[in-house]
C-alpha cells in the first residue's frame, strides 16, 4: 500500500488576491483592483486536467480554497473548480469542501452561493474581537462586522470555524482569557488559535527590526497564553487536537489532517505547494508565485515551477514534523518504512522520562508539555 493512503488525498486551491495586505501576513497574496474571474477558472481547470492522468483512480477526501482571500471569488468560480474536480476524481461520501473567508459584508453575502456551489465548511479569518486590535493587525473589518458575517455563515453552513491571533501588542493574559471565552461562546465546533509570529519580509517584520513594534508579550507571557488556551478550550469541549487547532469530537479539519497525517494533496494556484505520490515515489511540487507568471505557465503547459522526488529520509522527516503536531501522534513504524531506519529509542525514552513524549498503543505522542516546545523535541529526535 502506498504510504499516502494513511493520510488521504486532498486538493488545495490558492486564490492569491486580497483587498488589503495584513502587516503580519507572509502568505502569497496580492492586492489588485480587478480580477478576470473567468480567466482564473479556466486556468484552474486547465491545471487540473493536466494533473489528472498522473493521479487517476483516487477518491478525493477534501478540497480547500485558501489564499489570499478566497471569499473574493465569485460563487460560480468556486463551483466551477469543484465541478472540474468532481469530473476527475470520485468524491468521498463525507468530502469536506472548505473555503477561507474574510468577514466583510460583500463576502458574507456570497455565502449562500458558495453553499449552493458545493462548499460545506467555512473558515473565517476574524483574528481579534475588538476594534483597536483589528486596526493594529491591519484588518479592514470591525468586530461588529465580523460577528454579523459569522452569524450569516452559521445560517448557511453546519460547519464554521474561525481564526484568532493571540500574544498581540499590549495583550495581557487576562485580556486573552476574556477574549477566548467570548470566542468560545460564539464557536460552533472548531477554532484555530495562532500565536502572533513576526515573519521576515512582512510589514511587522520590518517594524520589529527597527524597534518600532512595541509592547509584544514576553516569551513567558506568550507561553502562559498558550497553556491557558489549551485549558480553557478543553473545558468548553473543544480540546486541542493539533498545536493551534481545537475542535469538538469529529469536527476536526479533515483537509488539514491530510497534511498532518502526511497524505497526498494536489496544490494548484500561485505559490501552491503539493505532495503527490507517483510510482510509489513521493514528490514535492511548487507553483510559480506571481499570479501573472502562473497564468502564463499554465497556458504554456504547467503551473509548476519545481517538482522534486523526495528521498525516503526527507519524506520521513516531513512525516515526523507534521505528525507530532497532532495530539494523536504518529506510528513509528511508518517512519521506519519511509526512512529505512528507526527513530532513536534511547532519545524517545529520555523524552518520555522528561514528560515530553508518551507512548500509547504503539504510537508516539507529544504531551501537552512537549507540544509547547515541539521544535526542541523534534531537534532531539532528529539530531545526528
Image (cartoon, rainbow, N blue to C red):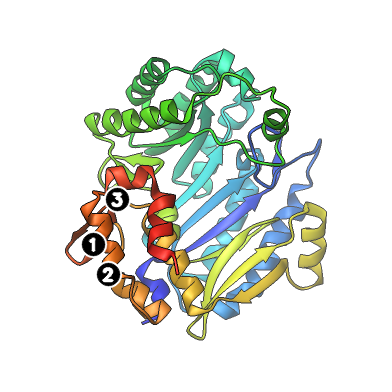
Closest to the camera, between mark 3 and mark 2, is 2
Relative image position of residue 61 (x, y in whole percent):
42, 62
For this rendering, which residue is in front, 225 or 123?
225
- In the rendered image of this protein, does residue 2 appear above or below residue 316? below
Q: Is residue 347 left or right of residue 86?
A: left
Residue visible at 61% across and 26% down?
Answer: 104
Residue visible at 71% across and 28% down?
Answer: 207
**Structural distance between the alpha carbons of marks 3 and 2:** 20 Å
Question: Which quarter of the rendering shows the C terminus?
Answer: bottom left
**Structural distance between the alpha carbons of marks 3 and 1:** 18 Å
The residue identified by callout 2 is: 345
The residue identified by callout 3 is: 327
The residue identified by callout 1 is: 349
Which of disc 2 and disc 3 is earlier in sequence?
A: 3
How many residues crowd mark 1 within 10 Å: few (<14), some (14–19), many (20+)? some
For this rendering, which residue is in front, 101 or 177?
177
Q: How many marks?
A: 3
For this rendering, which residue is in front, 125 or 164?
164
Which of disc 1 and disc 3 is earlier in sequence?
A: 3
Mark carried by residue 228: none
Amino acid at each position: 500500500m502506498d504510504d499516502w493512503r494513511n493520510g488521504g488525498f486532498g486538493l488545495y486551491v490558492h486564490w492569491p488576491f486580497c483587498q488589503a495586505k495584513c502587516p503580519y501576513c507572509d502568505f502569497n497574496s496580492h492586492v489588485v483592483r480587478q480580477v478576470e474571474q473567468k480567466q482564473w477558472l479556466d486556468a484552474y481547470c486547465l491545471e487540473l486536467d493536466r494533473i489528472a492522468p498522473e493521479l487517476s483512480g483516487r477518491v478525493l477526501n477534501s478540497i480547500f480554497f485558501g489564499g489570499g482571500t478566497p471569499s473574493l471569488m465569485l460563487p460560480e468560480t468556486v463551483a466551477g473548480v469543484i465541478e472540474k474536480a468532481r469530473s476527475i476524481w470520485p468524491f468521498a461520501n463525507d468530502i469536506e469542501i472548505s473555503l477561507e473567508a474574510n468577514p466583510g459584508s460583500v463576502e458574507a453575502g456570497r455565502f449562500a452561493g458558495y453553499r449552493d456551489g458545493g462548499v460545506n465548511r467555512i473558515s473565517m479569518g476574524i483574528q481579534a474581537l475588538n476594534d483597536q486590535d483589528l486596526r493594529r493587525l491591519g484588518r479592514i473589518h470591525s468586530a461588529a462586522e465580523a460577528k454579523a458575517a459569522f452569524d450569516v455563515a452559521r445560517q448557511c453552513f453546519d460547519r464554521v470555524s474561525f481564526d484568532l491571533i493571540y500574544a498581540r501588542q499590549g495583550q495581557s493574559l487576562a485580556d486573552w482569557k476574556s477574549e477566548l471565552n467570548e470566542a468560545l461562546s460564539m464557536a460552533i465546533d472548531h477554532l484555530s488559535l495562532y500565536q502572533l509570529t513576526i515573519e521576515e519580509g512582512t510589514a511587522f517584520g520590518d517594524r520589529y527590526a527597527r524597534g518600532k513594534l512595541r509592547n509584544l508579550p514576553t516569551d513567558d507571557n506568550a507561553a502562559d497564553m498558550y497553556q491557558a488556551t489549551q485549558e480553557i478550550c478543553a473545558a468548553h469541549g473543544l480540546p486541542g487536537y493539533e498545536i493551534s487547532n481545537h475542535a469538538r469530537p469529529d469536527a476536526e479539519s479533515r483537509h488539514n489532517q491530510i497534511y498532518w497525517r502526511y497524505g497526498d494533496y494536489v496544490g494548484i494556484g500561485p505559490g501552491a505547494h503539493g505532495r503527490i505520490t507517483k510510482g510509489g515515489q513521493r514528490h514535492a511540487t511548487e507553483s510559480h508565485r506571481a499570479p501573472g507568471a502562473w497564468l502564463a505557465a499554465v497556458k504554456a503547459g504547467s503551473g509548476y515551477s519545481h517538482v522534486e522526488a523526495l528521498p525516503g529520509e526527507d519524506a520521513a522527516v516531513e512525516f515526523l514534523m507534521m505528525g507530532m503536531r497532532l495530539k494523536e501522534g504518529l506510528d513509528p513504524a511508518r517512519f521506519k518504512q519511509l526512512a529505512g531506519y528507526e527513530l532513536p529509542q534511547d532519545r524517545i525514552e529520555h523524552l518520555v522520562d522528561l514528560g515530553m513524549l508518551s507512548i500509547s498503543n504503539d504510537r508516539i505522542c507529544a504531551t501537552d508539555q512537549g507540544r509547547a516546545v515541539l521544535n526542541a523535541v523534534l531537534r532531539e529526535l532528529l539530531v545526528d
